[in-house]
Image (cartoon, helix red, strand yellow):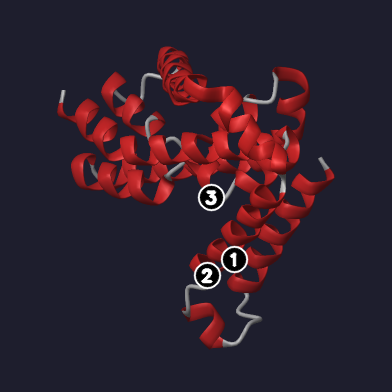
């Protein structure tokens, strides 16, 4: 939990610094987040490679690893159906499209904005950012109360990048490869599933 609060604190500090322009203009205008993500992935890779349990865990998971993204898709679909039953502001297909962003807010919100307009695009952006932030904050508790795979499925497509370090810390380094595979599969599926449900 302490690690999650630290991550949120850094995020909040970044928002405040960016909002009030306390930083030099060159930093504000440049997108350093991509390079920070590369560095993060590099360090996580070192951690996985240096841990002999990681590769043995991959052999132990074998075909079971392929079921994890499927569980996430089914769980997200059920969750979306629950939300849609409570709120009637959007159609079922629109609500499914938002859910099928799987936390990949940058891509899914662009797709949805182009196909359904800015209102649903903003909803998709906020919903998927919330999914990522909730995973970052609650991953340790999810791992304790719902099992080691819970933070991975909660992270959705982000389990291969932004939420990977906190998932690795909460579930164990042996689950990092599962998380990476899970995130890659969902990232590939996002444009197909979003486009599919919006074409119905």
**Mark 3 neighbour class, 10 Å CA radius: few under 14, some 14 to 19, many 20 or more:** some
- The residue that label 2 is drawn on is 35
Circle 1 is placed at which residue position? 39
Q: Quadrant of residue 80?
A: top left
The percent coordinates of residue 193 (x first, y second) are 28, 30
- Residue drawn at the location 70% of the way across and 20% of the way down: 147
- The residue lying at 63 percent from left, 75 percent from top is 20
**Which element carries disc 1, helix, strand or loop?**
helix
Residue 133, by quadrant, is top right
Q: Are marks 1 and 2 in contact (CB under 8 Å)?
A: yes
Pointer 1 local density, CA inside 10 Å: few below 14, some 14–19, many at least 20: few
Q: Residue at x 35, y 26 (%)?
A: 95
Compared with 151, 71 (above or below) is above
Indicate which disc residue 161 carries: 3
Question: 137 and 69: which one is in front?
Answer: 69
88 vs 132, nearest the viewer: 132
- Residue 73 vertical placement versus 180 (above, below): above
């Amino acid at each position: 939990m302490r690690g999650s609060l630290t991550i949120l604190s850094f995020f909040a500090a970044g928002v405040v610094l960016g909002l009030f322009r306390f930083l030099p203009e060159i930093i504000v205008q440049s997108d350093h987040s991509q390079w920070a993500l590369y560095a993060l992935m590099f360090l996580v890779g070192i951690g996985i490679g240096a841990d002999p349990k990681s590769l043995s865990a991959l052999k132990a998971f074998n075909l079971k690893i392929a079921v994890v993204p499927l569980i996430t898709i089914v769980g997200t679909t059920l969750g979306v159906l629950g939300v849609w039953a409570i709120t009637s502001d959007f159609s079922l297909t629109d609500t499914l499209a938002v859910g099928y962003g799987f936390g990949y807010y940058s891509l899914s919100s662009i797709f949805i904005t182009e196909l359904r307009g800015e209102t649903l695009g903003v909803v998709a952006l906020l919903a998927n950012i919330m999914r990522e932030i909730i995973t970052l904050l609650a991953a340790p508790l999810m791992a304790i109360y719902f099992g080691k795979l819970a933070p991975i499925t909660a992270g959705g497509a982000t389990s291969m990048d932004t939420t990977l370090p906190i998932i690795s810390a909460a579930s164990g380094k042996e689950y990092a490869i599962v998380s990476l595979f899970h995130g890659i599969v969902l990232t590939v599926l996002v444009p197909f599933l979003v486009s599919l449900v919006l074409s119905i």
